[in-house]
C-alpha cells in the first residue's frame, strides 16, 4: 500500500506547488447500487413476497425492474458522473429464475446499463456452467477477486478479479468479492477455491495503485460484518458496495442497521437491503490525491411514488406469461400473515421456520423419522393472510430442494445444532429451524464451544433429553444433507440416506392444504439463555 500513499502524497504536493488557482478541481461521483435482487423483476409486497397488480396500482408494492429503470435514469440525470454497480445475488428467488435461469437478469441489467457486478453465492447455485452463460449474455464484466478459478474452464478467461473504468476523465478501480464459504452455500464445483477476502482485496488494491489508480471501489457480496473487517484491515479502499446480508443502512430510518454510509476509517460502506426495494445513491467527492472529502447519500425507496417504465413493465409481463398457470394456482389458506422475515428466522424460532419444519416432519413421520432440521437460509419470504398461491410458496422455498431422510447419532444432531447457532451474530442462513426437538443455546459461549446447552426430543407425549449414543431418524433438504451451510456431519455421518424425496415447496403446499385455514404459531422450541 506504500505505492498508493506515495501517489497520493505526490499528487497533493503537486497541487500545493501549482497553487490554489492551478489546482485540479475536486472530482464528484455518484455510485448507484443494488444487491440481492433475487429475480424480483416484478414488484413485491411489504413482506418481500408477490404483490398483485391491483395492490401495485394502489401504491402498495415496491421495487420491480420497471421502477428501477425509471429511478436509475432520474439519478443519472442528477449527476455529472455516475456508475451503476451490483453487489451480487441476481440469481434465485422467484419463478423467473426457476424458468429462465439467468437470461432475464442479463436482459434487464443490460437495459439498465450496469458497469459491473460481483459474484454472489447464488450465482453458483446451478454450477459454473449457468454462471458462464449469464456472463456471456452481459454487456459488462463480472468480478471476483477472492478465488482461484484457473482450473475451472467455464470461468477462466471470462471472470476477472478487478477492472479499471473511466468516468468523467478519471480512472476508477473496481474489485469483486464473494463469500469465502461459497463452497458451503452453493455449488461452485471442485475447481473453484475460495480465499480470504482481506488478502485478496489488498492484492488487487496494490496492483491498481501501481497502475496509478487512486479511486478504488470494492463490490462485496460478503456481508456487512465482513465488509467492516475488510475496511479495517486493508488500506487504499475508498468505497465498499455491499451485499449478502441484506442490510438496510440509512440516516433517516429507525429500522436501519447503521448509517449510510458506514465509515470505517476512511472507507465508506453502503448496502441497499434487497429485492429491488431500494436503489442506493452515494455521492462521493474526491480530492486531487484520490482521498474522499465527502460521502453522502441515502437509499432511494422504490415505492409506489416511482413511476414504472412502460416498456419494461410490458416486457416483464410478456416474460411472466408462461409462469402464470403455476403461480396463480391456489393451494392453501392462511388465517393470518406468516412471518418469514430474514432477521427473525436466522436468529431465533420463527413462524415460517416452524411451518417448514413441521411440514417436512409430517411428510415422513411414518418412516421412523422423529427430527426435522431446516436451514433458515432456505426460507426466503413471508406469506400474507388469505389465499396462498403456489407462487407464494415458491417465493418462500425457491431452490427446488428435495426432502432428504437419513439416520445419525444424537451426538451428530447436537453437532448440527451447534453448527446452526455458530454464526448467529452474522445472521447466517445456517441457523436451524426445527421440529420434533427443542433446544436451548447460550450466546455468551463461543461458537462451536458448547453453545447448545440442552436438547430435548419428543417421544410420545413427553420430552426427553437427547441420547448422544442413540440413532435418530432425521429429515432435512438435499442441500443441507449434502453438507450445505456447514452441516458437514450430515454428509459424512449420515446413514441410510435418501436424498430424492418430493420437492420441499410441494411438501409445504400440501401440508398447508391439509391443515385447512393454516394458523401460524410459535411454541418455544428454540430458546436462548
Image (tube, rainbow, N blue to C red):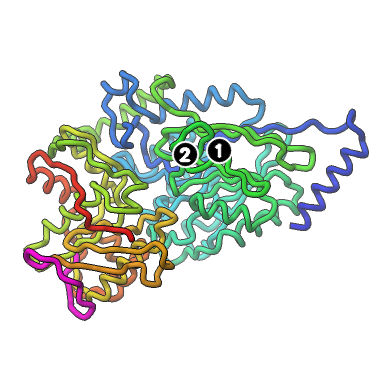
Is residue 113 something one can see in this rendering?
no
Residue 235 in the image, given as x and y percentages of width and height: 69, 54
Left or right of 449 on screen, residue 258: right
Is 473 included in the stretch rendered in magenta? yes
Q: Residues within 10 Å of mark 1 (few under 14, many from 20)?
A: many
Give the magenta range: 459-475
Is 132 included in the stretch rendered in magenta? no
> Residue drawn 41% across and 60% down?
423
Quadrant in the rendering for residue 314: top left
Residue 353 versus residue 320 in the image, above or below: below
Left or right of 507 on screen, residue 92: right
Residue denoted by label 2: 256
Quadrant in the rendering for residue 442: bottom left
How many numbered marks does the figure carry?
Answer: 2
In terms of depth relative to the viewer, which is nearer, 239 or 349? 349
Residue 408: mark: none
Amino acid at each position: 500500500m506504500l505505492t498508493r500513499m506515495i501517489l497520493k502524497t505526490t499528487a497533493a504536493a503537486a497541487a500545493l506547488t501549482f497553487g490554489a488557482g492551478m489546482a485540479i478541481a475536486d472530482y464528484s461521483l455518484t455510485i448507484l447500487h443494488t444487491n440481492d435482487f433475487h429475480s424480483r423483476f416484478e414488484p413485491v409486497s411489504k413482506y418481500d413476497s408477490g404483490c398483485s397488480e391491483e395492490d401495485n396500482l394502489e401504491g402498495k408494492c415496491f421495487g420491480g425492474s420497471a421502477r428501477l429503470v425509471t429511478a436509475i435514469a432520474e439519478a443519472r440525470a442528477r449527476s455529472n458522473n455516475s456508475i451503476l454497480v451490483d453487489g451480487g445475488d441476481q440469481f434465485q428467488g422467484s419463478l423467473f429464475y426457476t424458468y429462465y435461469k439467468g437470461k432475464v437478469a442479463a436482459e434487464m441489467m443490460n437495459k439498465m446499463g450496469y458497469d459491473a457486478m460481483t459474484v454472489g453465492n447464488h450465482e453458483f447455485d446451478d454450477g459454473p456452467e449457468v454462471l458462464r452463460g449469464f456472463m456471456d449474455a452481459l454487456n459488462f464484466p463480472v468480478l471476483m477477486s477472492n478465488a482461484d478459478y484457473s482450473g475451472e474452464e467455464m470461468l477462466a478467461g471470462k471472470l476477472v478479479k478487478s477492472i479499471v473504468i473511466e468516468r468523467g476523465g478519471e480512472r476508477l478501480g473496481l474489485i469483486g468479492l464473494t463469500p469465502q464459504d461459497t463452497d458451503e452455500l452453493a455449488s461452485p464445483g471442485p475447481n473453484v477455491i475460495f480465499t480470504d477476502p482481506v488478502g485478496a482485496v489488498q492484492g488487487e488494491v496494490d496492483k491498481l495503485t501501481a497502475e496509478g489508480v487512486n479511486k478504488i471501489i470494492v463490490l462485496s457480496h460478503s456481508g456487512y460484518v465482513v465488509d467492516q473487517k475488510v475496511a479495517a484491515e486493508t488500506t487504499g479502499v475508498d468505497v465498499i458496495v455491499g451485499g449478502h446480508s441484506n442490510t438496510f443502512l440509512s440516516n433517516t430510518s429507525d429500522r436501519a442497521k447503521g448509517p449510510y454510509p458506514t465509515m470505517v476509517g476512511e472507507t465508506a460502506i453502503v448496502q441497499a437491503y434487497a429485492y429491488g426495494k431500494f436503489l442506493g445513491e452515494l455521492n462521493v467527492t474526491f480530492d486531487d490525491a484520490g482521498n474522499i472529502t465527502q460521502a453522502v447519500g441515502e437509499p432511494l425507496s422504490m415505492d409506489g411514488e416511482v413511476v414504472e417504465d412502460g416498456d419494461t413493465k410490458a416486457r416483464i409481463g410478456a416474460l411472466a406469461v408462461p409462469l402464470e398457470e403455476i403461480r396463480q394456482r391456489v393451494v392453501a389458506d392462511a388465517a393470518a400473515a406468516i412471518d418469514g422475515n430474514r432477521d427473525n428466522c436466522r436468529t431465533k424460532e420463527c413462524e415460517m421456520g416452524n411451518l417448514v419444519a413441521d411440514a417436512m416432519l409430517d411428510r415422513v413421520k411414518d418412516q421412523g423419522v422423529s427430527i426435522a432440521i431446516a436451514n433458515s437460509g432456505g426460507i426466503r419470504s413471508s406469506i400474507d393472510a388469505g389465499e396462498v398461491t403456489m407462487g407464494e410458496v415458491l417465493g418462500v422455498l425457491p431452490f427446488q430442494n428435495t426432502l432428504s431422510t437419513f439416520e445419525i447419532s444424537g451426538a451428530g444432531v447436537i453437532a448440527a445444532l451447534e453448527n446452526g447457532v455458530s454464526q448467529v451474530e452474522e445472521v447466517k442462513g445456517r441457523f436451524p429451524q426445527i421440529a420434533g426437538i427443542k433446544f436451548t443455546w447460550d450466546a455468551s459461549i463461543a461458537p462451536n464451544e458448547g453453545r447448545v446447552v440442552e436438547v430435548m426430543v419428543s417421544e410420545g407425549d413427553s420430552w426427553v433429553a437427547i441420547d448422544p449414543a442413540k440413532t435418530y431418524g432425521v429429515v432435512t433438504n438435499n442441500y443441507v444433507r449434502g453438507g450445505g451451510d456447514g452441516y458437514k456431519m450430515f454428509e459424512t455421518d449420515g446413514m441410510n440416506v435418501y436424498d430424492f424425496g418430493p420437492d420441499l415447496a410441494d411438501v409445504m403446499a400440501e401440508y398447508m392444504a391439509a391443515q385447512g385455514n393454516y394458523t401460524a404459531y410459535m411454541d418455544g422450541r428454540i430458546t436462548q439463555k
